[in-house]
Amino acid sequence: MTAFALLFTLSAIGISETVYLIRTRIAAQKPVCPIGEGCATVLTSKYSELFIVPNDILGLFVYIVISVIAAFLVIGVEPLVFWGIALKILVGIASLVSVFFTYLQWHTIRAWCFWCLMSACTIWLMGVIIIVSSAV
Amino acid sequence: MRKTSFHILRVGLAITFLWIGVLIFKQPEAWGAFLTPWAANLLPVPIREAMIGTAILDIVIGVLLLIDVFAWLAAFVAAIHLAIVLTVSGITDVTVRDIAILAAAIAVMAESLPQSIRRKMASSTA
């Protein structure tokens, strides 16, 4: 229950973050960059889209699905085993994609985006929570 | 306040409402037990249905606050909702924390009020 509460909370933070990024992109505004100055550089680079879909929309979709699955697992919507496996696979794939995007910022774009790193850390933290809760 | 602190408060409030909504969906009857007998007798529908309606309302409020769409309206409804909760549940060891959530909802509403409403309020008080 605690693990699902944490996953739900983290995914909600992710939703609010990606919605902010989508809004600023649609409004053609520069996002606020609380730490560093590379947000605009990264978010407007050619790597800001994966298979035509903007990364912020992809992230929003992933966070919504994770929050819904976490809610289903808490409420007890069957099949629980399927939701549990789906959650692990989704967070696993998202973690790997986050590693790829972080590598791109470090090695290819050579600029750091606060929001992208925050999103990556959110996903990795979800992975840690799932691993720890499975082990306990 | 409409900067970082506002958004932290808005998202925190959103998560609280979303999570409470999920928990009420899990055990609506258990959450219905918070109602005082006089309030439960006033309900026109069974307590389970009333609590599921509350859960849906909580989730809608949470979503609107989270995505910052009609945040002022969501916070306004949240404040009324919490005032009703405090009235029908009484201030207990658990519900005393709702006072803080009520204050947070009022703060978010005050900060996110559209300019048109602010102007109307200013002209009516002038």
Image: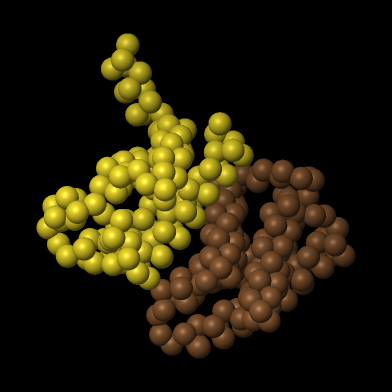
Tally of numbered tags: 0
Closest to the observer, A61 or B18: B18
Q: Residue at x 69, y 75 (%)?
A: A132
Q: Quadrant of the C terminus of chain A?
A: bottom right
Give coordinates of residue B124: x percent, y percent: 28, 17
Taking depth in this image into account, of B42 and B82 the one nearest to the observer is B42
Residue closest to the eye, A114 or B51: B51
Residue A85: give x, y in percent of width and height. 56, 86
**A36 to A14, vertically: above or below:** above
Kindly tell me whether residue B64 is visible in this rendering.
no
Residue B53, quarter of the rendered image: bottom left
Which residue is pictured at 41% across the width and 29% down the height?
B115
Q: Quadrant of residue B24?
A: bottom left
**A98 in relation to B122, above or below:** below
The brown chain is A
Q: Position of residue A40 (x, y in %)?
A: 72, 49
Q: Which chain is yellow?
A: B
Question: Which quadrant of the view contains residue B32?
Answer: bottom left
Position of B51 relative to A114 (above/below): below
Q: Is residue A82 above or below residue A133?
A: below
Q: With A72 as the anchor, is A44 left or right in this view?
A: right
Q: How is the image coloured?
A: by chain
What residue is drawn where x is 41% and y is 65%? Answer: B22
Residue shown at 72%/43% (left/top)?
Answer: A34
Locate residue A43, reporting x and y percent: 70, 56
